[in-house]
Every structure is written in structure tokens, then in C-alpha cells.
Amino acid sequence: MKIVNMKVHSIAIADPPLRSSYGLHAPYALRSVLEIESEDGIVGIAETYGGDAPAQALEGLRTRVIGADAYKLTGELAHLVEGQGAGFARSQTYLVPGENPLDTATRTYAAIETACLDLIGKSVGKPICDLIGGRVRDRVPFSAYAFYKHAGGDGERNDVRADEYGEVMTPEALSREVKQMIGHYGFGSVKLKGGVLEPKLEIETIKRLRSELGPEVPLRIDPNCAWATNTSVVVGKELSEELSHGGYLEDPTSTLEGMSEVRKQLLAAGVTTPLASNVAITSFADLPQSVGLDSVQIVLCDSHYWGGMRQVQHLATLCRVFNLGLSMHSNSHLGVSLMAMAHVAAATPHLTYSCDTHYPWQSEVDEIIVGGRVPVTDGCVTIPDKPGLGVELDYDQLARGRERYSRLTYRKRDDEAEMQKHVDPTWKRILPRW
Ligand code: GKR
Ligand code: MG
């Protein structure tokens, strides 16, 4: 099936002023949307990280893509994801996901793979999850992803979004936010983005969530390396009960060595809470050292930067072999990415935790798929009975996203700069902060 056309669209979508140890989200998040078209007029689509660099990386492969056979293309580009040895380990400690030059190749490949699979699925009438091994679940569970945030649903000037959750900078407000999100989407587990308030306030937040939601709702906290090893151990001990029952402690501190030290000290204190990571481990090359040091017990996969859906399935196999859990990372995204996440999760038997998603933070005003937002019910996305990803682009909405992008003065995510602009001109990302 010959590919005759390829289009890369850079779009901007409103994003609320969410906080993390990286800083502050900008009023718009950036995404790239890829379309590849076959000679019989079928279009395969993908969504990935945005800004000029990811779009240029995709454009850089135009001559390899056009004229290629969709069934063979990802094989021909396999050098982008395979054979990456120890020299290619690529921690995200100091870089927000999508801004790491070391995973440009795997991110670019992943978008092309998703678009090819969507194209193939649409041409043979099969959902992607059934093309990549067959689904083991029809409904993919996601977790509520709670953030401390400033007031605003964001966007700018005459293009602002409704602020569903208001300002959330205290344990009380955070617990209100979570209950509201659960009320709307029915999530059965909760992840708190930490590394924002003093650790004692984040401990209080988790304790409050536990007492208000009960032990049947698993809790996770992810400060993105904001804590020193000793602080991580203190928090791990304080929250040993709250993070048990299917929860975890995610990237409390930086580096595989740091995570290993936290693990050792927690085990010595009788705390078995598993450590999860999407920062210390972001590639296959990180796994041997992590396993050797027992740094990470749960890997957070992400087909967007691990090199696509099939690489995530390989990762799942390795996790099973090494007795590691597997969860899924996310970043600000729309419905095309959500469906790609759902398809790979549906076809990955060893996915042992509900997946993260930022989707509740995005607005229907910005959605680019026909029919509007993907429904999330009882915390799950149901794989639709439709070919490929199961969604089509709404070209008017896509054009609006492009128009927003063209108005923006920034072309990459920079949460530190946003903090300095809107909250504190002297703010720096200091690791560890506490
Ligand atoms: O959106 O601010 C954010 C998150 O901090 C995101 O960038 C992280 O990559 O969600 C992510 C995580 O789990 O580390
Ligand atoms: Mg994380």
C-alpha cells in the first residue's frame, strides 16, 4: 500500500496553569498531528509532542515516507528504534518529556508507526489493538491525574477556557479537585503530581485523599525528582500505608542510583511500597542497571517516546521477565493520542496498573476528532468497534489548532520560563528542592 502524501500539522491547545517540579504549564500546550495518505485515498493519523523541533524531525523523513509501502515502512526505519546500546541511556531528569534531544528518533518513529498502523487498520477494517497482537481487554482503565494549579482553565485573551477546578494550592482544594474529577469520569485510582508544595503538605494531601476516598482507591505521588534521597525515605515511611493497596511512589528522587538508595532504606525500614519511574528509566538501555540496582519496580511506558506501540509491547515482556510492574505515562494530549494509548494498553497483557492521562485537563473546544471528546466512563476508555485508531480528524478543528499555534510566540515547552513570567521572576528548577 503505497504512501503518496504526508502532512504534519503543528497545533496549540489550551492548557490550565498546572504546577510540577518542572515549573508551570504555559497557556497552550503544543502538539503535532501527522497524516499519511495511501494511493487509494485512505488517511492514517497520529498525534505526538509539539513545537517546531518534533515537526521538523517528522518533515526530515518526508522523502523516506512518500513512496514507501505502509506495511514495510516501519521496518525500513527500524534503525531509529533498535540497537540502542548503553551509550543511549537518556534520563529525563532535567528535561520535560518531548524536549529530550536523545529521544528525537524514537519519538519520530513512534508517530510514523501509529499513523501506518491506523492506515493499515482502516484499509483492512481492523482496530489497531487487534493488528498488534489482539486485545486482552476492551476497556482500558485510566487514573485521575491531580495537579496543584493556579486559577484558570487557560488559553489567552479572548480565547480562554472555562476553569473547572479553580485554584488548587492546598490539600483541601486538591481533594476537592480529585472528587470532582472522579465524579465526572469515574476514575478508580488517583495520581498526585507532587514536588510543588512543602513535602509535609503533600503528605497531608495524600493522607486526606486516603481518608476521604478509602483504601479501595489506589494512590500514587510523583514529585518528578524534587526530593533528596533522605526526604524521599521520610515521605515513603510517612505514606507507607496510603501508598500500599496498589499505589506507588513515582520518581521521588533523581537517577537510578538515587532511586536504588531510597528503595534500600525503605526496605530496611519494612516499607515495601514499589518505586515507579518515567524519569530514571526512559529507554531499554536504562533497564539493566535499574534491574541490577533494584532502582525501579514499576516502569511507566509511553509509546510516544519509547518508540511506538510494538516497542511498548517488547518492554512489557521484559518487565514480566524481570518481575517488574508496568504503568503508562502521559503528557498534555488530545483524543488521537488517548486512542493510541488505549489501543496499545488493550493489546498489552502485562499492563499491571491503570494508565495516566492528562485528558481531563484539555477542553472540548480544542479537540480535533470528529464527534468531540473521547468518552471516559467508569475511568475507562472503551475500544470502539471501528478500524485503526477508531477516530477521524475534524479538519475545521485542526485548522483552529493550527491558527492558535501560528499566534504563539513560543515553539517549545519551557515550564521554568512560565514560572518566571507568571509566578516568581527568580524561580529556578532546583533538584533536589527538598
Ligand atoms: O504535565 O507537568 C506535567 C507532568 O509533570 C508531565 O510533564 C510528566 O512528564 O506526567 C508526567 C510524569 O508522570 O512525570
Ligand atoms: Mg512521572
Image (spheres, grey):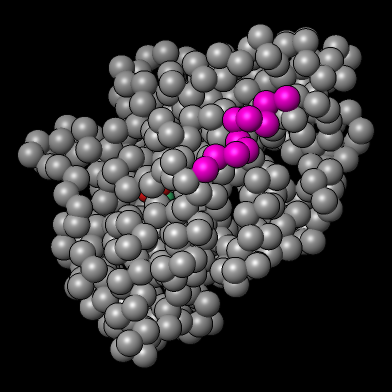
The residue depicted at 21 percent of the width and 64 percent of the height is: 228
Residue 186 seen in render:
no
**The furthest residue to the bottom:** 270
In the rendered image, residue 303, in percent from the top left (x then y), is placed at: 60, 44
Query: Relative to 416, is 404 above or below?
Result: above
Image quadrant containing the C terminus? bottom left
In the rendered image, residue 431, in percent from the top left (x then y), is placed at: 20, 53
Residue 20 seen in render:
yes
Image-quadrant location for residue 210 = bottom left
Number of disc labels: 0
The verdict on residue 79 being magenta is: yes
Image-quadrant location for residue 5 = top right
Dominant secondary structure of the magenta stretch? loop
The residue depicted at 40 percent of the width and 52 percent of the height is: 279
The verdict on residue 279 being magenta is: no
In this picture, residue 244 sits left or right of residue 350: left
In the rendered image, residue 135, in percent from the top left (x then y), is placed at: 81, 56
The residue depicted at 21 percent of the width and 33 percent of the height is: 417
Query: Relative to 222, is 151 above or below?
Result: above
In the rendered image, residue 144, in percent from the top left (x then y), is placed at: 49, 61
Magenta highlight range: 76-85
In this picture, residue 324 sits left or right of residue 30: right
